[in-house]
Amino acid sequence: MGGPVGPTGGVARPRSRLRLARGRARCVTSPPSRCDLGCRGRSGRLKETRGHRGCSPLGAPFCRCPRSMRKMLAAVSRVLLGAAQKPASRVLVASRNFANDATFEIKKCDLHRLEEGPPETTVLTREDGLRYYRMMQTVRRMELKADQLYKQKIIRGFCHLCDGQEACCVGLEAGINPTDHLITAYRAHGFTFTRGLTVREILAELTGRRGGCAKGKGGSMHMYAKNFYGGNGIVGAQVPLGAGIALACKYNGKDEVCLTLYGDGAANQGQIFEAYNMAALWKLPCIFICENNRYGMGTSVERAAASTDYYKRGDFIPGLRVDGMDVLCVREATKFAAAHCRAGKGPILMELQTYRYHGHSMSDPGVSYRTREEIQEVRSKSDPIMLLKDRMVNNDLASVEELKEIDVEVRKEIEDAAQFATADPEPPLEEIGHHIYCSDPPFEVRGANQWIKFKSIS
């Protein structure tokens, strides 16, 4: 039936049997089969080799010529190398049973005009812990990358970094709803991320590219997202704006609050006290938050303020002082303050005691008014990322290997975003007048003199 004729006149079937020859298993097949690897001599035809073409112990035909053997060994080594590169930690993490949650004691808040404050214990789920860790690591790595890009002169102008203060932006976001509102000063990169923008959009804005969150026209101090109003460059000017946003929440009858942030350096501004008065008078759902990182530019709080109890500055407004280096403490305090405002009790004031590792801005080395030993002590004892990591590992919410994997993923995300931020094109000059208003018809904007005009498109 088309096959080779055997000695008895019937059709001969190929016979395959394993033989032991010189300590090796080889297959003898009759009739001989072609080499699947296609080894050829100089003539281009299939090259015959000494002995019979055999097959592997699994029955797959192969040629024992030197070239084909090298190819097969290379293929096997690639397979083995790929298997070896798979991190064993993932297998361990997948097979390990972690706790779903754990209860932690947190630092008691100092209170002003409040009978009771936030709870002194809190529950952290494994899911929330991993999310907080990833967010804080992303903010930390993003700021360090911004530092690098600034020193390479890819980022220009003002640039204020918040590494060290990650527990503030992550903890505040964890204590409110996405529909709530937030406005802050110029140290805004972390809040921009926690409010929902990507690292790519933030770094591209820092480098002035079209893919930035403000189309490359805002820079470090002017980033915006849904329910996030910046990023404001004038010291303390965002506080009356935050009171206005809270007024809009109350006027529209929405169960929403506005987080209005400022630093200890802005705490002595007169407009802040005017906003306090108006918010208390109208019982606005506004949480005034002072991020006290101990230095206003290069001046310590003790040299700048007669009273450093910033949580009491509201006088007739209740206040609480919070450990701003503990993400869980910030979260619980924020939940407490938001519930206070939603209950119609009016504004409340929070002081977050935190610390920045960088100087005031990239033009400030940060070591002329404080010692390197002071910075290192805070890093070693109060770093917000290390505090969360130790809690999770010691209470079986995560393993060191799992958190290291997150670190690797975050670094890759930051590197990819930095590549985009340096390769994306800058906005053309013709778009300098765009997006002044939200939904207005196009109109002309005067340039540097009356003969230069640009079209503005919403």
Image (spheres, grey):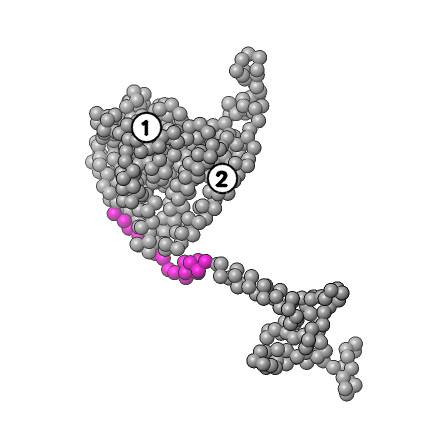
Task: Report x, y in % for residue 95.
Answer: 41, 61
Nearer-the-camera pick, 390 or 273: 390
**Looking at the image, is 393 positioned above or below residue 384?**
below
Left or right, 196 with respect to 347, comes to right
**Looking at the image, is 1 positioned above or below residue 77?**
below
Q: Residues within 10 Å of mark 1 (few under 14, many from 20)?
A: some
Task: Name the residue at 44% across, 33% down.
Answer: 150
State which quarter of the image contains the N terminus: bottom right
Picture quadrant where residue 72 is located:
bottom right
Q: Looking at the picture, which amino acid does disc 1 mark?
A: Met
Q: Which residue is label 2 attached to?
A: 418
Disc tally is 2
Please tell me which of labels 2 and 1 falls first in the chain. 1
Nearer-the-camera pick, 61 or 402: 61
Q: Is residue 286 visible?
A: no
Task: Report x, y in % for residue 355.
Answer: 30, 36
Task: Name the residue at 77% across, 79% down.
Answer: 4
State which quarter of the image contains the C terminus: top right
Task: Report x, y in % for residue 13.
Answer: 72, 80
Task: Name the residue at 36% across, 38% down.
Answer: 163
SS of the residue under disc 2: helix
> Which portion, as a residue range, is magenta?
87-105
* Distance from the alpha carbon under mark 2 to that under mark 1: 28 Å
| Disc number for residue 297 | 1
